[in-house]
Image (spheres, rainbow, N blue to C red):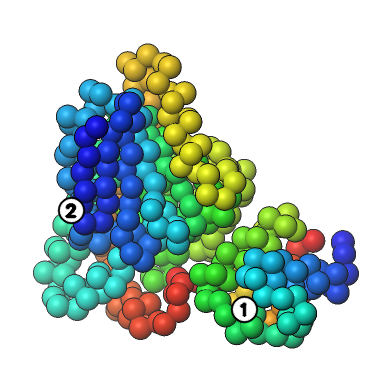
Amino acid sequence: MKTFQGKTLSWRIADGVIELILDHAPCNEIGLAMLADLEQFVAALGTLKDEAHALIISSARSEGFCAGGDLRELFRLSQKVTGAEKLSGLRNFIERIHRVMNTLDEAPFTTIAAVNGLTFGGGFELALTCDLIIADKMARFCFPELRLGLIPGFGGIPRLKRDLGNAIVRDLVLTGRSINAAKAQSVGIVSQVTAEGDALRIARETAAQLKKFDRDTSVAAKRFIKPIPHDELRREIDIFCELFMRPAVEKGLRKFVESKDALPYLP
Amino acid sequence: MGSLQNTTEEVLRLASEHFKVPREQLAPDDDFFKKLGINSLQALDLLTRIEHHFKIELPDYELQGVSDFRTLAERIQLRL
């Protein structure tokens, strides 16, 4: 068995299944540390791909799969610089995230997100890179970015548009409301809903099923079914960076950072 | 559609069971954050359980400013 232990996540491969486990308190927020670990992971895929037929991404945190970008870190770092330096730093971060997400999206094996609890913002976007989402019945999905004066910036809108009708994309992005796993399944985001605490077990059973198929056929099918929306992803980066530079975003981030609430994204 | 009284009772029972607070200690006008000792993350958990139990969708923004069981039951009632 090959294993890796990073600061914010770990992975191991056994019997052809790579398991990537996010474990970064409080709820796997994606900041520089997790981005660096994810970059190491996707770099390792070059050697892992020959012995893998599936990847499962899950969370070790009971709070949820991933609450999204690390907004506290983003606010802190953005306060240290201004103007062009702030914009270039942000663009660099977002482009690095997109490279990771795109690599996961087009991974040459079937990918499964086994999600629980909060699956918000960037966490939802990470799940959307996967071919299948298997959700604990208590999982909730949300794009809260408009509350901060932003749009989702880790590839969420293009991937959601690829997978779903435009009406539900507008509903989720423009209202910022959270939906439960049953609703997410009814609109086509979630493949399977499990009992509480069983998402990873069901994801493993699904991965075992995938092993029965010819690997090259699975890869060909995936490439045919799931094109990467590169043009829209690049446009998303531009819009996100443009919006981020406005004072309204700094105000929204400050309110978030100063909140004592356990869930400052909502309502 | 059940009565508001029935819906309130169901919400109190759900909260009591999940957060392990004796039912008799909960009243319709109680502040559920204080009485259950929960934060907004746990309130979102309660919302998910309510949606499953009543088979409804209750957008979280409709609960803005709602902190007592009776008003919560009124919001549920509008979706039944």
Residue B53 position (above or below residue A76): above
From the viewer's side, name the closer residue of A31 and A142: A31
Name the image quarter holding residue A34: bottom left
Residue A176's label in the rendered image is none
The amino acid on which the numbered mark 2 sits, given as a three-letter code, is Ala
Q: Residues within 10 Å of mark 2 (few under 14, many from 20)?
A: some
Residue A222: give x, y in percent of width and height: 38, 25
Extreme residue toward the left, this view:
A85
Residue A125 position (above or below residue A82): above
- Contact between marks 2 and 1 (CB within 8 A): the answer is no
From the viewer's side, name the closer residue of A120 and B12: B12
Q: Is there any visible trace of residue B63 in the rendered image?
A: yes
Side of A153 where A100 appears, left or right: left
* Alpha carbons under labels 2 and 1: distance apart: 39 Å
From the viewer's side, name the closer residue of A136 and A81: A136
Side of A73 where A196 appears, left or right: right
The amino acid on which the numbered mark 1 sits, given as a three-letter code, is Leu
Q: Is there any visible trace of residue A164 in the rendered image?
A: no
Residue A103: give x, y in percent of width and height: 25, 38
Residue A215 position (above or below residue B4): above
Q: Report helix, strand or loop for mark 2.
A: helix
Residue A133: give x, y in percent of width and height: 47, 41
Residue at the spot of label 1: B36
From the viewer's side, name the closer residue of A105 and A67: A67
Kindly identify the residue that appears in the image at 44 percent across and 34 percent down: A204
Residue at the spot of label 2: A36
Name the image quarter holding residue A232: top left
Residue A118: give x, y in percent of width and height: 47, 59
Kindly identify the residue that appears in the image at 37 percent across and 14 percent down: A214
* Chain under numbered label 1: B
* Chain under numbered label 2: A
Q: Report helix, strand or loop for mark 1.
A: helix
